[in-house]
Amino acid sequence: MKKVKNTIKIFFTICLLYSCNKTYDNPPINEVPIGNIISISDLKDMFTGSATVIDSNYSIFGNITCEETNGNFYKEVFMQDLSGAIKLKLKASGGLYIGDSIRINIQGITMSEYGELIQLENVDVDQQVVKIATERFITPYEATIPQLSLSEDQSRLVKLNDVEFSEMGMTYADAVNLSTGSRLLSDCNGNTVSVRTSGYANFADDTLPSGNGSIVGIFTIYNSEKQFVIRDINEVMLDSSRCNAGGGGTGGSGDYLYKDFDDGSLTSGGWKTFWSGTNPNIGEWEILFGTIAKASNYSNSNNYACESWLVSPNIDLSSATSPYLVFDNVTRYGGPQLELFISSNYDGVSNPDVQGTWFNLTNYVPNWDTDNFDWTLVPSGNTDLSQFIAPSVAIAYKYTGTNSDGATWEVDNIIIRE
């Protein structure tokens, strides 16, 4: 009996030793094939204009220049090598971070475009990406707004210097309704790029900085419009003195707003136009001779009912003491008076007919032109804005025409200063 018990003890001891030293199978390693290595630039050159599945065994190498952690990007990152950059739409969120050096096998991935921005769709980070190293950060490309190329620089990490937001007193986006915001960033010559911010970004409800300086982000495009996406709010360094000019002009010291239309644009520097009427485009504000804003509802020997607004960007007058507005104007032919309005709660994007509280300044302008049968611009004189000092102020010109009459109005050299 004792011998049997010893035998049982030996058996269980052997079993215990075996179980303690048992080795388990390692999980299979995801071997991502390399295939032929090509540059991002060569890859984008293959794009034919329509969505295409890549059927060749290619790999691209590069570094990640943005990530999803700030909420401004979701299931998307941007990748860059020495030849160019490209947007990656991820199959699932997470896994890639700024500074990651990676390789992607792109066989089976779809290359497409959205608003002319070339992208790779449904990239599976777990199955198609190999992370080679971390903290391999790319130095942003320093450029001016006019230098940015819609083709060569799209998706590139860029730093813009000597720029400022045209629309002040606003937030980056609508964090309450979680809707995307689009805010104009301009240089001192009136060149602009649209800064797009998701309503989910952790800085969406931050107020736009009012100064001038530098900003780092990803340069993107949408239907030939230059756009910019912030990757980190700490890379927005707009804390220096603003330009003297406020969009499309040279201005002078102390000018809060300056618009002379010499750049041939109604909307540079954050200006906007809104129109409604009975005949498409008749009565809209337009550029005359490349340097003057004009509105007229007369076409083909007829007048057409219309309403047309020319609206300034929001400007910060909180540091002003005695601001005033001056502009040049001229009118011909009979019709309603051109009107001037001011608002301190305009959102900067909506039709002023339906948004903002607008005070009518028309009767406060010292000198409106009358029809003297010539086209000589006359100065308006100083319109006192002291009672409208606020962090976010916009002015607007409202043109009205009817089916029976309508004057022609021209406006130039719009300045707010003190």
Image (cartoon, grey):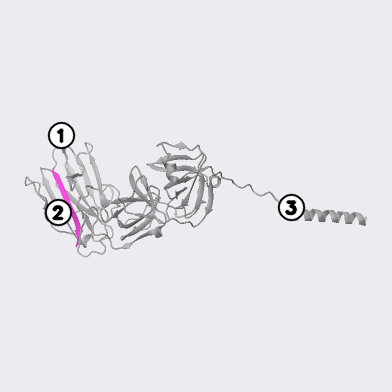
Q: Secondary structure at mark 2?
A: helix
Rounded to the nearest angstrom, the CA distance separating label 3 from label 1 is: 94 Å
**Which disc is residue 300 wearing?**
1
- Mark seen at residue 363: 2
Q: In the depicted view, which residue is nearer to us: 224 or 399?
A: 224
Q: Main secondary structure of the magenta part?
A: strand
Tag 2: residue type?
Answer: Asn
Assign a secondary structure to mark 3: loop
In which quarter of the view is residue 381 placed? bottom left
Please state the total of marks drawn on the protein image: 3
> Looking at the image, which is closer to me, 137 or 271?
137
Where is residue 5 drawn, in percent x and y? 89, 56
Q: CA distance from mark 3 to mark 2?
A: 93 Å
The residue that appears at 80% across and 53% down in the rendered structure is 15
Direction left: furthest residue: 372
Percent of width and height locating residue 94? 51, 50
In the current view of this chain or complex, which residue is farthest to the top? 300
Mark toward the viewer: 3 or 2: 3
| Three-letter amino acid code at the position of disc 3 | Lys
411 within the magenta span? yes
Which is nearer the N-term, disc 1 or disc 2? Answer: 1
81, above or below 115, in the image:
below
Start-end of magenta stretch: 407-418
Rendered location of residue 391, percent (x, y): 28, 60
Assess disc 1: are there few (<14), some (14-19) or many (≥20) residues with their C-alpha within 10 Å of its C-alpha: few
In the picture of the structure, the residue carrying the numbered disc 3 is 22
Q: Is residue 113 left or right of residue 320?
A: right
